Image (spheres, grey):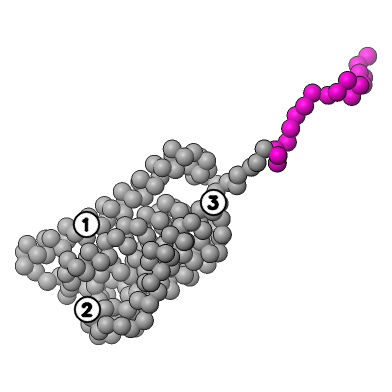
Amino acid sequence: MMQSESHSLNNPREDSRHLKRSFTAVASFTAVLWLIKIVEMMVGANFASYGVYPGQPGGLTGIIWSPLIHTSFSHLLANTAPLLLLGTALLYGYPRSAKIVIPAVYFGSGLGVWLFARDAFHVGASGLTFGFMFFVFTVGVLRWDKRATALSLVVFFLYGGMIWGIFPSQPDISFESHFFGAMIGIALAVLLRNRDPYPPEKQYSWEQDEVTDPEPGDEPPDNTF
């Protein structure tokens, strides 16, 4: 275990700072998404054509751009709160795993869409939110320590209904992005469940070793000469 991570797990002040840093990082990325949408509106452009288009060589570049593009402000707004909460939960609870999970979900869900999805432009950050949600929930079930369980319960109660999003519903919703993001999140939860250190267990006073002065007559014999 790295010393800084161990210190964070035992230091409430450092733990609070880690939570704030996690939220700030996700909020900064979300702000970029809003900036892109505002620029798109101001110049009168339609960035949807930069999304993933399955089976077409030119559509491969959409794997990079697709999570940054949204068809409308309502589409972006629907992704904003889940992205903020689920992204923060991932970075806060599993900082080591996040270094693998974020790029894997980002690019892996787009690749899955390019290989298997319907013929249309697929855009939006919902593949990220589904990947983060399924990772945090699944790894919490597998680890079962207090922090992992708490994070798992929070994301389930707030966004457990997202599970239905991996199935076809409305023709204008890319359930394929949801599906591949979720599958990657689950697979990585299984593979990386022990990558991050477990929080230290509370030790009660009766479990601690005690040192007492010897009773009269219990002193060790003097073997000096």
Residue at (29%, 60%) from the top-left corner? Answer: 81
Magenta stretch encompasses residue 96: no
Query: Which mark is drawn over residue 32?
Result: 1
- Quadrant assignment, res 209: top right
Residue 144: x and y in percent read: 56, 59
Circle 3 is placed at which residue position? Answer: 197
Which type of secondary structure does the marked residue at label 2 adopt? loop
The crowding category of the residue bearing disc 1, from other C-alpha atoms within 10 Å (few below 14, some 14 to 19, many at least 20), is few
Labels 3 and 2: the sequence-earlier one:
2
Alpha carbon of mark 3 to alpha carbon of mark 2: how far?
40 Å
Residue 189 showing in the rendered view? no
Mark number displayed over residue 121: 2
Which x, y percent locates residue 204? 65, 41
Tell whether position 223 is magenta: yes
Real-space CA distance between mark 2 and mark 1, rounded to the nearest whole angstrom: 21 Å
Residue 173, given in percent of the width and then of the height, sits at: 26, 78
Magenta region, main secondary structure: loop
The structure residue drawn at horizontal position 55% and vertical position 51%, both measured from the top left corner, is 198
Bounds of the magenta span?
206-225
For disc 2, the neighbor class at 10 Å (few under 14, some 14 to 19, many from 20) is some
Quadrant in which residue 124 is drawn: bottom left
Q: Residue at x 47, y 61 (%)?
A: 152
Say whether disc 2 or disc 1 marks the residue closer to the N-terminus: 1
